[in-house]
């Protein structure tokens, strides 16, 4: 027992120096780690202090939203510049439209491109217009929108033709561009057919009733005159019928459509002839024969009513009626006195 106890004590004495060295090594490692952690904390504290001081001078930018980050990542380069330019152009266009300058802007652009085309040799040097009678060459060019600034290269032939046909004087038009500088326009004009009076206005009309222009020129003074609502579209047929009876036509001043149903004739001496609604041709034939045989139009009458098929009613003027009444009185008095009438 004593031997074993002494053996244990001797072993413990031999192991103590090794345990002391190990403990010392562990302590040194702990101290070294604490020193590194202290230095790390000091460095971090200095970095945070510097970051706070910079943050006071320049506000920290927040990270962009996710959508913005994706756009910046995947859109092509210089898209921002292109969008900015597009926005500026759109703003300028909105200003032009809102300010009422769109037409001026279009004209300016058209003039600029026409000037370039003219300088390149596409100036309109020759204009040939065929078929005109009432309209002048300048009027036709103005109607078609062709000016001295127009170039053959950018001239819209279909547009010129449409503008020409929109004019009531022009029934049809053809526009040809012959490069480098010749323009040919062929037109078919309507013919002034009659003067039409309605609602206090006097207009020149074609045979189809189209209003060509207001009556302002005396060159249309000799055209036949038709009066009343609907007379413009019915004038061609009635005037063609009236032309078959030149004795009546030659003394007619105006044909008046009554109620859009029948015609009256106003003669040059003021006589009114009331024609029937039906069988107008027969009535005109009878009227012509009466004037030829009885000199009807030379008599002192103010109206001839032919609306009844079986009779003709003549209305005397006041003077003629008074003279006729006096004549009857004279005959009556002579008859009473026994004198020959």
Image: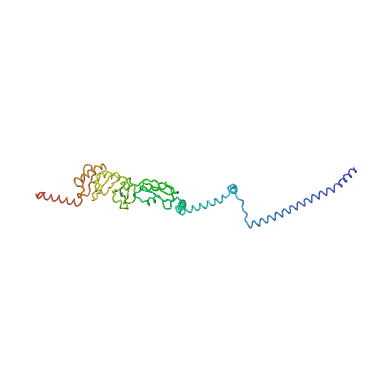
- In the image, taking residue 151 as reference, residue 259 lies left or right, namely left
User: Where residue 203 appears, x then y in whole percent?
Assistant: 32, 50
User: Where residue 300 appears, x then y in whole percent?
Assistant: 20, 50
- In the image, taking residue 100 as reference, residue 85 lies left or right, namely right
Report the coloring of the rendering: rainbow
Q: Quadrant of the image for the N terminus?
A: top right
Front residue (pair 208, 45): 208
Task: Count all numbered tags in the image, as a single digit.
Answer: 0
User: Where residue 52 appears, x then y in whole percent?
Assistant: 66, 56
Residue farthest to the right?
A: 3
- In the image, taking residue 15 as reference, residue 291 lies left or right, namely left
Front residue (pair 206, 4): 206
Front residue (pair 115, 198): 115
Residue farthest to the left?
A: 338
Q: Is residue 281 above or below residue 37?
A: above
User: Where residue 51 appears, x then y in whole percent?
Assistant: 66, 55
- In the image, taking residue 97 as reference, residue 209 lies left or right, namely left
């Amino acid at each position: 027992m004593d031997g074993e106890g002494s053996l244990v004590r001797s072993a413990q004495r031999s192991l103590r120096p090794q345990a002391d060295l190990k403990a010392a090594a562990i302590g040194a490692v702990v101290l070294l780690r604490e020193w590194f952690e202290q230095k790390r904390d000091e460095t971090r504290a200095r970095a945070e202090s510097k970051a706070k001081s910079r943050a006071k001078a320049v506000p920290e930018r927040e990270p962009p939203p996710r959508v913005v980050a994706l756009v910046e990542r995947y859109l092509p380069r210089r898209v921002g510049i292109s969008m900015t330019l597009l926005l500026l152009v759109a703003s300028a266009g909105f200003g032009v439209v809102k300010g009422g300058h769109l037409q001026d802007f279009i004209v300016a652009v058209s003039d600029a491109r026409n000037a370039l085309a003219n300088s390149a040799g596409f100036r309109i040097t020759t204009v040939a217009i065929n078929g005109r009678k009432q309209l002048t060459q300048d009027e036709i060019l103005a109607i078609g929108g062709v000016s001295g600034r127009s170039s053959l290269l950018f001239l819209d032939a279909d547009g010129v033709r449409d503008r020409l046909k929109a004019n009531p004087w022009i029934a049809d038009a053809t526009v040809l561009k012959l490069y480098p500088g010749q323009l040919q326009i062929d037109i078919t004009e309507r013919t002034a057919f009659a003067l039409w009076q309605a609602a206090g206005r006097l207009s020149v009309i074609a045979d189809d009733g189209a209003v060509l222009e207001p009556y302002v020129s005396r060159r249309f003074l000799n055209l036949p005159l038709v009066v009343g609502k609907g007379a413009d579209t019915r004038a061609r047929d009635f005037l063609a019928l009236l032309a078959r009876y030149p004795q009546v036509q030659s003394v007619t001043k105006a044909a008046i459509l009554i109620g859009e149903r029948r015609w009256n004739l106003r003669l040059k001496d003021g006589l009114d002839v009331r024609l029937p609604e039906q069988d107008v041709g027969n009535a005109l034939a009878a009227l012509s024969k009466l004037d030829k045989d009885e000199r009807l139009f030379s008599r002192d009458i103010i109206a001839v009513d032919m609306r009844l098929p079986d009779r003709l009613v003549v209305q005397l003027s006041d003077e003629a009626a008074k003279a006729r009444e006096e004549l009857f009185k004279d005959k009556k008095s002579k008859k009473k006195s026994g004198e020959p009438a």
